[in-house]
Image (cartoon, rainbow, N blue to C red):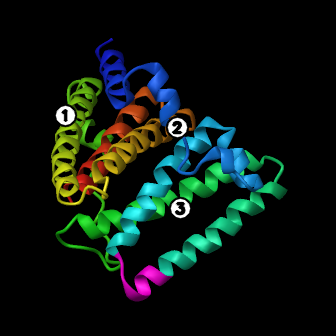
Amino acid sequence: MRIAIGLAFVLAAGVGLASQQASAAAPSFDCTKAGNWAEKQICGNDDLAALDAWFGPLYGQLAQRLTGKDLDALKAHRKAWLKQRGDCKAEVDGVACMKARYQEFTADLEKQFAGLVGGGATGAQGVAPAAKSPAAECAGKSDPKDCLEQLVETEEGNLANAEAKAGDAAAQRDQADQNAHSADRLEEANVAWRAYRNSECKRRQQGSSEADPTAVYSSCLVELTRIRVGELKS
């Protein structure tokens, strides 16, 4: 019962009311101007819209931190990926194909971003070593479900604090430059990220073969939220 209540709290805190959650899945582009097959599929599918809503800000944040050959490589990757996304039109289930393409590229972008903002020692590929998973953290506890719930609530609090501090910094930039609109863009990115997180964790839960899929969802919430907090602090 406690874990269910905790998860309900997280989802409510993520986007507010249920009607706000629906609008939070708006993609990163204007659907009234959708000009190709891929964009039309995104505008007609909530899961794809949520994936695209976070992909845009994430790609932008990473691109801002890269220069020279690294930035060129990222742009080339995106160009090739856009073609792969469009090629999904030829697949039997084009939507499923697009979801897979988004999930693959988003995971790669998040790993790159974590390597840039995580600090500390890195591995041979320049990416910070993976931390112990939330599920593994709680595996030895007397009540793993209760442990996961506590982690979810703790990280949700950390996220709220990080968003508030980043928002204050963005507001100060806007005072210096009234055309910057940094706070508005940050707020949009925060909403987009929460929609993506909830969609991605739901996907992992549904595709899991674990005896307790709810634990998979909770662990995913903690894992992705920790990454987002690191991004905001950077």
- Asked whether residue 208 appears in the rendered view, the answer is no
Nearest to viewer (mark 2 / mark 1): 2
Upstream in sequence: badge 2 or badge 3:
2
What range is drawn magenta here? 66-72
The residue lying furthest to the top in this view is 1
SS for dot 2: loop
Q: Which image quarter: residue 154?
A: top left
The reply to whether discs 2 and 1 touch (Cβ–Cβ < 8 Å) is: no
The circle drawn on residue 105 is 3
Dominant secondary structure of the magenta stretch? helix
Residue 81: image x %, image y %? 62, 68
Q: Quadrant of the C terminus?
A: bottom left
Q: Nearer the viewer, residue 22 or 153?
A: 22
Q: CA distance from mark 2 to mark 3?
A: 18 Å
Query: Could you tell me the amino acid type at mark 3?
Result: Phe
Residue 172: image x %, image y %? 15, 53
- Which residue is found at the position 36% from the left and 17% from the top? 4
The circle drawn on residue 157 is 1
Residue topped by disc 2? 25
Residue 129: image x %, image y %? 28, 65
Q: Nearer the viewer, residue 130 or 65?
A: 65
Upstream in sequence: badge 2 or badge 1:
2
**Circle 2 crowding by C-alpha within 10 Å: few under 14, some 14–19, many from 20:** many
